[in-house]
Amino acid sequence: MQTVTLSLKEKNAIPIEADTINPDNFASKSKDEIGAILVWYGNAQVTIGEVFDVAVDGSDSTENTKVVINGDVSRVKRIGQEMSAGEIEINSNVDMHCGSNMTGGKITINGDADSWVGCEMKGGEIVVNGNGSYYVGGGYRGEACGMKGGKITVTGNVRDYLGEHMCGGEIVVKGDAGLLPGISNNGGSIVIEGNTTMPASEMKAGTIIIKGEAAELLPSFAEDGTEDVDGVTYRKFAGDVNANGKGVLLVK
């Protein structure tokens, strides 16, 4: 097992683009080698060692590498982007694009996550022990698919466009979701344990379960009886009819 601990030296006002911070880049490397890896600090490149205090315990493969990040990284973007294995634990809020395009491994965020967390991820797991912002598990503008695989769990609330253009995978939100969760979905499953507004607009495939209240349910869904899930009976809707959709929306 290899554990890499990054401790932010001082809170940054200028955003840092840190897509190089992931187990794939750190596995089997020494403290000095990791410290020499570059990140973008505004419009200039600096080394990880200039921004973080670096500590390394052990040496191992990517799947057996854990990265622990301490300090307020709410202005550090793209942590864990495209990671394939291993683990990242972030002990604060984190900036946008965390875990985007990841294919494996696990990211645990012990705080809030800004927009596009898990955007277009294909595998792996993200746990947000706080709130999520916009486009959790969504897709970048102009792309046909957002999240394609893996699982995202948010223990708090999320804002608008949860799982936008989702094509696969699973999202669980323990709290409330904002406007239009599951918009333009083409697959996968979303579970919202709290309340939301206008779910599943233009949905073509996939399943969305609303355990709380669903305000402003769209008229373009056809009611299709009931369905039991884990001992709970839900009203079942099919649609979105406007998009010739075959998705399933379950409302308690």
Image (tube, helix red, strand yellow):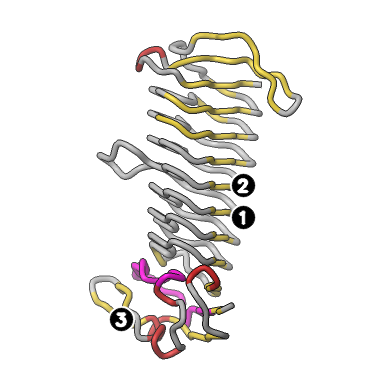
Q: Is label 1 in contact with label 3 (beta carbons under 8 Å)? A: no
Measure how far apart labels 3 and 2 are at the Cα level.
34 Å
Write down the residue under mark 2: 156
**Residue ranking furthest to the front:** 61
Label 1 CA crowd tier, 10 Å (few <14, some 14–19, many 20+): some
Write down the residue under mark 1: 129
- Residue 91 lies, with reference to residue 119, above or below; the image says below
Q: Is residue 16 magenta?
A: yes
Q: Earlier in the sequence, mark 1 or mark 3?
A: 3
The C terminus appears in which quarter of the rendering? Answer: top right
Mark drawn on residue 179: none
Q: Amino acid at mark 2?
A: Gly
Q: In the picture provided, is 229 more to the left or to the right than 201?
A: right
Q: Is label 3 in contact with label 2 (beta carbons under 8 Å)? A: no
Helix, strand, or loop for circle 3?
strand
What range of the chain is rendered magenta? 4-24
Residue at position x 55%, y 30% from top? 196
Q: Position of residue 42 (x, y in %)?
A: 28, 71
Q: Give the total of numbered labels.
A: 3
Q: Is label 1 in contact with label 2 (beta carbons under 8 Å)? A: yes
Mark drawn on residue 46: 3
Front position in the image: 41 or 167? 167
Q: Amino acid at mark 3?
A: Val
Measure how far apart labels 1 and 3 are at the Cα level.
30 Å
Residue at position x 47%, y 64% from top? 74
Q: Position of residue 189 (x, y in %)?
A: 53, 34
